[in-house]
Amino acid sequence: MEPTEVDRLITPEANTGRDPLTERPIMSTTTEENDEDIERIPERHLKTYRIHLLDRLIKLGVLGLLIVWGFVVLIKLVPAKLTTPKDTDVYHSNDTFRLPDPYMTEEGLLKVSFNYTRNESFVPQIHTLQWLRNNALEDTNNDKGLYFTSINNTYQIRSVIDASYSRILFEGQNITYGNRNFTVETITASPDLSKLLIKTNCIQNWRHSSFSTYFVFIEEDFSIQHIGDSIALTQWSPNSIELAYVQDNNIYLYSTKTKQTITQITNDGNHQIFNGRPDWVYEEEIFETDRTLWWSPNGKYLAFLKIDETEVEEYIIPYFVHNKVGQYPEMKSIRYPKSGTPNPKVELLVYDTENDSIYRSFVNHGKFHDSILITEVKWMGNNNLIAKVTDRSSNDLNVVFIDLRTQETKVVRSESSNESWWEITRKTMHIPKDLKKGRTHNGYVDLMPVNGYNHLVYFSSLIATTPIILTSGHWEVSSGPIAFDNRLERIYFQATKKSSTERHIYYVSLKKPNQIYEVTDTSKPGVYDITFSSNCEYALLTYEGPEIPFQKIIRVNVDKSDDKVIGNKIGKTVYYLEKNEILKNRLKSFSIPKKTYKELNLGKDNKGNDILVNAIEVLPDGFNKTLKNYYPVFFYPYGGPNSQQVIQKFSIGFSEVISSQLNAIVVIVDGRGTGCKGIQFRSLVRGNLGEYEAIDQINAATLYSKREYVNSDKIAIFGWSYGGYLTLKTLEKDAGKTFKYGLSVAPVTDWRFYDSVYTERYMYTPQENLDGYKKSRVFNVTSIGQAKRFLLMHGTGDDNVHFQHSLVFLDQLNQANIENYDVHIFPDSDHAIKYHNANVIVYDKLLDWTRNAFTERF
């Protein structure tokens, strides 16, 4: 194994004749030349020479004794352990705070540092399986657990129960077409596995979107067909003959059968009109993907969104170093709807491949008018669609039913959220008609609020208005429905039934509502995910923490488990796909800061109820609670509405680096407004972002400041994005009383500047809630300036939280004559801050700046 950078730093240097610290030649200590010179001295001068030599030796000896004596005195006066040039001892009334050795513990274990996190030394191996339908192959009688995967650049079909089964579809990393070589980036098999869609030359656009060159590989004759360049997306038809793709914001149909025939479905696409793909705000905030088109199960229809952002205001981002540096920056325009400004207009259309016609559904009728958001589109069989539509502030929800046979569109459900907002969900699941099982109509399972918590409900027909409640209780379905086993009529889902910081897998029967069965072992803490084979007979079960993750294949339809290890409670283990033994052995060489999950009581709310919040505490190596006024505390919140950081997944990252390198306690608090603790807990912040979130961080820090081992003068808070906003709002409300330092990266500072879809969901529009917007912005910079010091960092190319936020904030600081802060700007970096080595620098800055704060160098 090649040594890492830290390995090289802690390994004794070879005898190279060079000083490893200065890289200057080491002076020779041999005396041969001096002895020869002495022999050549004349006898009459030898006595004089010896007298002078003795005199010099005496003087050097005296000087040496003085140096040793001075060093001893210095040690007694300053009992410090010197480790690195950056280490500093700081005196307090009780114990002396020391930064630890950054590389090793006293027991000889390695410390967590960026050298290891950046080379992914602590990242577990997690595999994904692309499960295949049985009808893709000749044998459809039983579920073999077939999946498509890549092993050593060989794309093949494998079986989870038959290790000998293998069907190779493609080999290699490159293809040649027209005397040009193309590097394969991804391959997607057609439903019948007769063809492969090959993606090459990918150029990233925004977070989820890109433009690429696509080819089709025909397995039958090993031929390659070129679809086109600068294509935004492609999607196989269920018939495996046709491909839908989007180029220049128009939708095309490509036939692999009829001599590569191309049919243009839309012709009005341009820079403002998007067909089949989302614009910026729909990509970022609603669908979180690069596509808005959906094939019907039989391949006859293609549903798609038309998004018109003509009325959306432009935001210009200058790029200074992105391409070849010129005299003027490159300007890139985004149609970015800010809160209260015009949103893109959206329509749902359906293309009929047999009649070459387009049906326009009128999902925007009623009180919503043109200010609608289409948040989900799902096929319910071959001829019916369900679409979810909300108003722009997500107060009201319409569920729209579309019948393609009659070309009828109607609202079948209208819901109003009196307590909260409608969260975007994309897992509505079709439950097909089955007379043998007593299901007389097509229906669907949805996720809805039930007594203040998100739960599964079953609508027994597509036009039903009253659901059958499948799950209920003071816990939430965190992901679901995941799968439907038609044979056993089971709905599988992931939930927080045991704890809001855990995720276990359960199932419920359509015929036995509210009888919840455990799939995973809830006797031990755990976070699990699961994917199923075509008939739900086999599943890939992934354990994500809190211990080292593992993956295994289980046969689900077995009543009881024969396992004697953590994992599934029902179903038989077929085999382990991954145990992460390499990671397990590697961790034996490290001292990992101790992570614990806890619930903090932050006092009473205005109704007299306890404010109970989830928290993570990370303690440094050798933590000693008997020390007085010693440990610094580093708070690391995100805090966005319905988000969650405190979840028991395995991770060793930035929190552990801070704790290990700075001898600090790291605390992560999910305050009010965050998710998985019910609607009331998260909806409290609506219309008033930044208020309760900041109060909870301050109250949590106050609890820690009262602990004897905590140095209350060294409490810092750091956040990125919404966490950066929360950092500034916390400093603003705290005014230096509890938090002495703050680090804010890419923060929102005024919700008027952020996108409409996200902001209005939690704040309404500025026209409806002007006072709320005024209070929620970062405005009291004088109060922020009461902290000892704070740090601000942002990328100029941020398309999400625009650089405008930080510039307006800096202008406020200038006007208020605030100077106790530092700023670092990253040219052309987006919200992730990665361009031109920026990600290394931003985290180095965070660590070094915090080190300076905790060693009182400011």
Image (cartoon, rainbow, N blue to C red):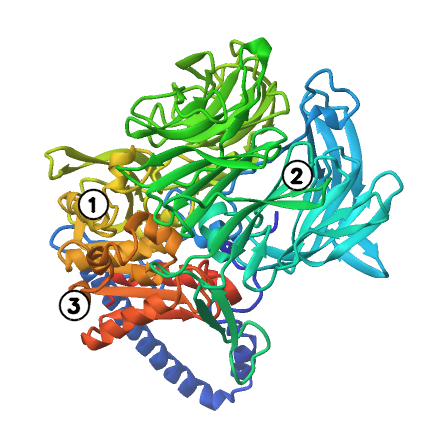
Q: Quadrant of the C terminus?
A: bottom left
Q: Amino acid at mark 2?
A: Tyr
Q: Do tag 1 and tag 2 residues touch (Cβ < 8 Å)?
A: no
**Residue 409 position within the rendered picture, expressed as x and y whole percent measured from the top left:** 51, 37
Please say if 64 is above or below 565.
below
- Tag 3 or tag 1, which sits nearer the N-term? 1
Q: In this image, 729 relative to 143: left or right?
A: left
Mark 3 lies on residue? 782
Q: Amino acid at mark 3?
A: Thr
Nearer to us: label 1 or label 2: 2
Q: In this image, 569 relative to 733: left or right?
A: right
Please say if 551 is above or below 422.
above
Q: Residue furthest right?
A: 221
Mark 2 lies on residue? 301
* Residues at marks 1 and 2, CA–CA distance in whole angstroms: 51 Å
Please tell me in which quadrant of the rendered image residue 294 appears.
top right
Q: Residue at point 23% right, 42% down? A: 684
**Residue 636 position within the rendered picture, expressed as x and y whole percent measured from the top left:** 31, 49
* Most foreground residue, 273 or 63: 273
Nearer to us: label 2 or label 3: 2
- Tag 3 or tag 2, which sits nearer the N-term? 2
Q: Amino acid at mark 1?
A: Asp
Whether residue 99 is visible here, answered yes or no, is no
Q: In this image, 60 relative to 482: left or right?
A: left
SS at badge 3: helix
Q: In this image, 804 relative to 147: left or right?
A: left
Q: Do tag 1 and tag 3 residues touch (Cβ < 8 Å)?
A: no
Mark 1 lies on residue? 696
Give neighbour class at mark 3: few <14, some 14-19, many 20+ (Cα, 10 Å): some
**Residue 357 position within the rendered picture, expressed as x and y whole percent measured from the top left:** 68, 45
Give neighbour class at mark 2: few <14, some 14-19, many 20+ (Cα, 10 Å): many
